[in-house]
Structure formats: C-alpha cells, structure tokens
Amino acid sequence: MLSELGNLSVLISIILSFFLIFFSLRELKLNLIKPTSKIINLSRLQLSFTIMSFIILLLGYLFSDFSIINVYENSHSTKPLLYKVSGVWGNHEGSLLLWINVLVIFSYLFFKKNIGVNKKFQLLTLIFQNILILGFFIFLVTTSNPFSKIFPVPQEGLGLNPILQDPALAIHPPLLYLGFVGSSIYFSAALASLISKFDGKNFATVSKPWVLISWLFQTLGILVGSIWAYYELGWGGYWFWDPVENSSLIPWFLMTALFHSILVLEKRDGIYLWVIILSILTFTMSVTGTFLVRSGILNSVHTFANDPSRGMFILTFLSIMIFSSVYIFYKFSPTEERSFKFFSKEFFILTNNWFMIFFLITVLIGTIYPIFLEVLTSQKISIGPPYYNTVLAPFLIPLLFIMAYGPKTSWIISKPFKIKKILFTLLISSLITFFIIFLIDQKNYLINILLISSLYLILQSLFDLFKNLDNKKQKKTFVNKSSLVSHLGFGLFIFFISLNSIMSIEYDLNIKVGEKKQLNEFEISLDDLKVYDDKNFKKFVGDVTILDNKNNIIEKLKPEIRIYNSPETITYEASIKSNIFSDTYVTMSNISRSEFYNIKFHKKPFMNLIWLSTILIVFGGFLRAIGRKF
C-alpha cells in the first residue's frame, strides 16, 4: 500500500513539474505584471506531493514495511526509532528523494518570496529549477526508485550500516543537502537573470539571502560530519581530506566567494558576470560531487552507491547542465566595465575570492587527480594531508591579514593614509612574527607563521568589535559586527588547528590483555577485556589505563569492538575523555588470529575549541541573516 502511494506521489509530482514548465513558458508571452494564481497553485501542489512522497517513505521505515526493497535493505524491526528515521536518507535512493525535496522546497519558497520582483526573471527561474527537478525525478524513477517492491515479503530487514547509526548522522545529510542542493536556486536565478536582463544590483538583493542560507547549512553540515568522523571512524582528527569530505568542501569555497562578491555587487556594478559565474559554478560543483559519491568512482566510507548506470546518468545530466549554462552565459551576458580602487573594500573582497578559488582548485586537483591517473595508467594512489597542508598553508597567511584589514576599509574609495598605515603595520607585524618564530621553533616555521597570523586576525577582530559596540549607527554596525564575528571565528579556527598540529601526541602499539607498554611520556596498559550482548550487536570492551611517568593515572578509557548482526559488520568505537583544552582518545582492534590488540592512543589538544570556533563562524552568518529582512 505504501509503495503504491509513494509511486503515485512521485508520478503526480513529475506531472506537476511538466505543467509548471509549460504554463510558465506560456505566461512569459502574456503582458502581465506578475505570475497568475495558476502558477502559484501548481507550485503549492508540487510541494505538497513531493513532501508527501518523502513522508510515505518515512512511514515505511517507522512501521518496518519490508515489502519496500529500500526499507528491507536499510532497516530492521529492532532498530531504535532515531535510526529508523535517519535510515530514510542513509542510502542512495532515500537520500536522492531528500535531494529532490530540497530542490522543490527552495523552488517554492523563492517563488513565493519574490512575487512581483520581475515577472520574466521569476518565471524563468521557476522553469530552470523545474528542469533540474524533472532531471532528478527521472533519475529517481529510472535507476533509484525508493518505492520498488519485493516479493515474497521478508520477515525481517537487513539493517542500516552500523557506522551510520549515530545521532550526528541523523542530521548531517539534511544539513548538507540544504546547503549544496539549496545552491540550485541561485543557479537557476543566475541563468534567468542573464536571459531576462535582470539588473545586477537587484539580482544581488534577491539572491543574497539564499546564498547565505545555503552557506549556513553547508558549514553546519560539514561541522557535524567532521565531529561524527572524529569519534565514529577512529581517525583521531577533525579532517583527513577524504575525497567525499572534499566534495562537500569545494562548494563551500564557492559559496563563501559568492556571498562576499554579492556584497560588492549590491554597492556597485562591474562584478555582475563574476557573480553569475560563481552562482553557476557552485551548483555545478555540487552535482560534480554527487557524481563522484554515487558513481562508485571514489572509495570512501561516505559513498552511497557503486552503480555505473547511476554514475552515467549523473554525468550525462551534469554535461548537459554545464554546456547549457555556458551557452546561455555567452549568448546573453552583457558587457560591463570593471575598475576597482586598490585597498578599497571591493579590492579586499575580490582578493578573498581569488584565494577561495585557489583553495578550490587545489582541493579539486587533489580529489580527481588519482581518478584520472588510475584511468590512464591503472596506478592507484591516494593524496593525503601532506599535499593539502603544504600547498594551502602558505596561502592562508596573507588571507588572514586580508581578513583583518578588509572590514576596516571603505567602499569604492581608498584612503592613502590608511594604505600607509596598513603597509607599516604589516611590516612591523612581519618582523615581530619572524623574531618570535626564531625564538620558539625553527622546525615548524610555517605553522608558527600561521599561528601568529591567526592571532593577529583574532586581536584585530576583537579590537574592531569592541570599537563598534559604541557606534550609534546600529543597522550598519550590526552588519559589520556579523562579519567581524565570522572573521574572529575563522581566526580562532586556524589558531587552534595550528596549536593542535604542533602539540598533538600519537602512539600506535600492539599489546596483550594484562600487558603494559612504556612510551616516552606515558605508560599504557590493557587491563581487561569484557564481552557484552547489546540489542543488535555484541561488544568487546577493553579497559585501557593511561599513566604518566610517575605512575599516576591520567585516564581510564573503554574502547570497543562491536560485531553487528544485521548487517554483519565489525566497527571500532573510540573512547574519548574530553575537556575544553584536550582530548584523550583511544581505539582498539584485534590483530587477526593472535592474542594481540592494536591500540591507537592520541592526545589531541583544543578539539572542542576547534568545533566552537566553527560554530562562531556560523553564528556570524546567523547574525547577518537576522540583521536583514528576508
């Protein structure tokens, strides 16, 4: 019953998408001030039936309807309620249905919000958005139908991948989808703006809140995913440049550049085409990441599928999208004059853009180069942290100084005395920095420069924030404060990452139960191993004691090896004792056919402060959002 209702909802949604495109094209020819109520009602119906299809799949999980293949393959009757809900999007088919729901929700909200702005622009945005919706609906029904039935109906399901049975994974995918799938709406708006000759400043005003919303959710999604990977996958760090992690970071660089560029476009012309390019690129890179994740090309714990037919569909759709966008851009893009004063606010923002693009290219090369190398030479390689750290770290240093001075400058004009002051301060700061680094540590000079540069941004942002507290121009300074808060958060983020890199301690050892191992500063013992039966898994819990050189107990930790029944999977659960300044982190795994256990011990400083710094970055964006009318 649920399967039939789900397929019917999807079918009606597809028909409504066709109707929306057809009637929108027809209304473009009519001499009307704004779209008719017919378009509004069709959008509302499309939203209702699309959400209904998702609710039906959710009910299938909640009531363990194993007649639906998707529920059978990803759920189990004994699974906790939270993981039944998150199981809906913890697989390829369900996540694709969530993707389509986000496309439709953003389409409806953008249309409702901008009624009366410009009829041609609004209808063209709706048309392009529904072409995307139709494309993904066709993908859903032809290769990835979440409502396909199975007969005879099994008595029990196979269960969700155990590493996905986690509270953070219940919210991580929806947050990311609201981020990079939400970028579809300003992709569609950008193409519509070119064809309708929509004014650049008006386009900036219309698209700015949607860019900010998607950026906020994308940042939160990356943060939650990073926290989950830290304690669930046993990596012992906040970021490991996993290819699928990178696929979420690449659109974030573009969103960040786009939002800053829109701030310029609101003030003056000359950057309209650049904003259009960034709007197109952001969603294009989001779909590119989707292709990498769902085609089976990448090998990662994050990948949803390993089906070449699905990859071919997305690649074909992506190619059509790119070529169509390029054609529309070159056919309809206007000419514009570009002239910007050095050391004006626009100059600093556009410089920030080029740093973001450089970071994007670096990460993109590191992600796809192994793929091309394997195709061309059959040689398999992986590109890890050393590449990214070596290439990206030197360019973060000037970016931090730019972020410190950018908010202090004026729009359009540059003031000579400020330029001299900036150059003088930079010179003095550089001399002090190198002197401090020489005294502290000559081996980690790059990290130390990064540390001092981030500290400079922190102090400058704090100074500017306190300075603005007494400013009477509340509306203007509220916006300035939001930028300063995000910049402060970014400075703290780099500062604590640098300290974490310098001060982290890591040991990897093999040990028997009852044995002790002496390390440089610590002694580690595996005191005991106990076995427990849980609801849907068996766990082996180790009693690990960490002592200092004086035999004082620092921590007692209990890492686990879990053996799940449905599906049959082994996971290694980290034991973490955490405080505001440091984490003690231990994982345990059995060495096959032996009485030895592999213990990985990490002392990770400032992990919680790294997370809090990211939250502060998001909070700055939130302040910007509530400081304006949407």
Image (tube, rainbow, N blue to C red):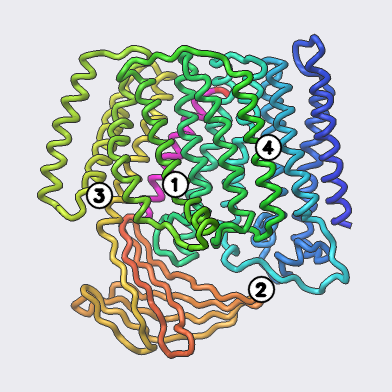
Three-letter code for the amino acid on which mark 3 is drawn: Ile
Residue at mark 4: 320
Q: Residue at x 67, y 24 (%)?
A: 113
Magenta-drawn segment: 607-628
Q: Work out which quarter of the rendered image holds the N terminus and state it.
A: bottom right
The kind of secondary structure element at disc 3 is helix
Q: Which mark is residue 567?
A: 2
Residue 156 lies, with reference to residue 350, above or below; the image says below
Residue at mark 3: 447
**What is the magenta segment's predominant secondary structure?**
helix
Q: Measure how far apart labels 3 and 4 are at the Cα level.
A: 43 Å
Residue at mark 1: 363
Task: Please indicate whether residue 463 sits to the left or right of residue 141 in the image.
Answer: left
Residue 608 position, x and y percent, is 38, 54
Badge 1 crowding class, 10 Å Cα cut-off, few under 14, some 14 to 19, many 20 or more, is: many
Badge nearest the viewer, 1 or 2 = 1
Badge 3 crowding class, 10 Å Cα cut-off, few under 14, some 14 to 19, many 20 or more, is: many
Task: Please indicate whether residue 251 sits to the left or right of residue 69 in the image.
Answer: left
- Assess whether mark 4 and mark 1 are in contact (beta carbons under 8 angstroms): no
Badge 2 crowding class, 10 Å Cα cut-off, few under 14, some 14 to 19, many 20 or more, is: some
Residue 286 position, x and y percent, is 58, 42
